[in-house]
Amino acid sequence: MLTSDTPAVRRYFTPGKDLVTAGTKEEMKRVIHYYLNHPAERKAIQHPGQITVRKHMYKHRAQEIIQVLKRKGIITADD
């Protein structure tokens, strides 16, 4: 995955391990060109990124939200 370098991305992912980030359009072009020419490095990031992103899918987020709501007493286990 190639994405913009933002605090939210860095909160959930490790650039260079889970994905690749770029801060500007020019940097994005350089990164794209680099990884197109270095497939082994691209694949080395691809697999860990796929594992990490699974933790951030809607199903997992919904489970986390439900747990927080239960802890806060907003909903009960019977809801």
Image: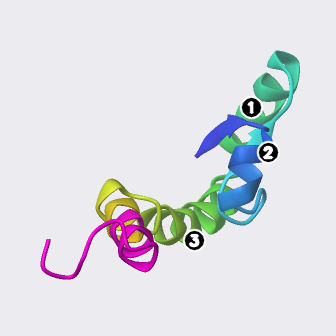
Please, is residue 61 above or below residue 21 in the view? Answer: below
**Highlighted range, magenta:** 65-79
Q: Where is residue 68 shown, x and y percent of the image?
A: 45, 71
* Element type where label 1 sits in the image: helix
Q: Which residue is mark 1?
A: 33
Which type of secondary structure does the marked residue at label 2 adopt? helix
Residue 73 placement: quadrant: bottom left
Label 1, label 2: how far apart the Cα atoms are: 24 Å
Residue 33: in magenta span:
no
Q: Secondary structure at mark 3?
A: helix
Count residues near mark 2 (Cα–Cα under 10 Å), then give few for <14, some for 14-19, many for 20+.
Answer: few
Q: Is residue 11 left or right of residue 58?
A: right
Determine whether label 1 and label 3 are within 8 Å by CB. no
Q: Earlier in the sequence, mark 1 or mark 2?
A: 2
Query: Disc 3 and disc 2: Cα gap in Å?
Result: 20 Å
Q: Residue at x 56, y 61 (%)?
A: 46
Residue 59's spot in the image, x, y percent? 29, 62
Amino acid type, callout 3: Pro
Rendering coords of residue 56 (x, y %):
46, 60
Disc 3 marks which residue? Answer: 48
Visual colour scheme: rainbow
Amino acid type, mark 1: His
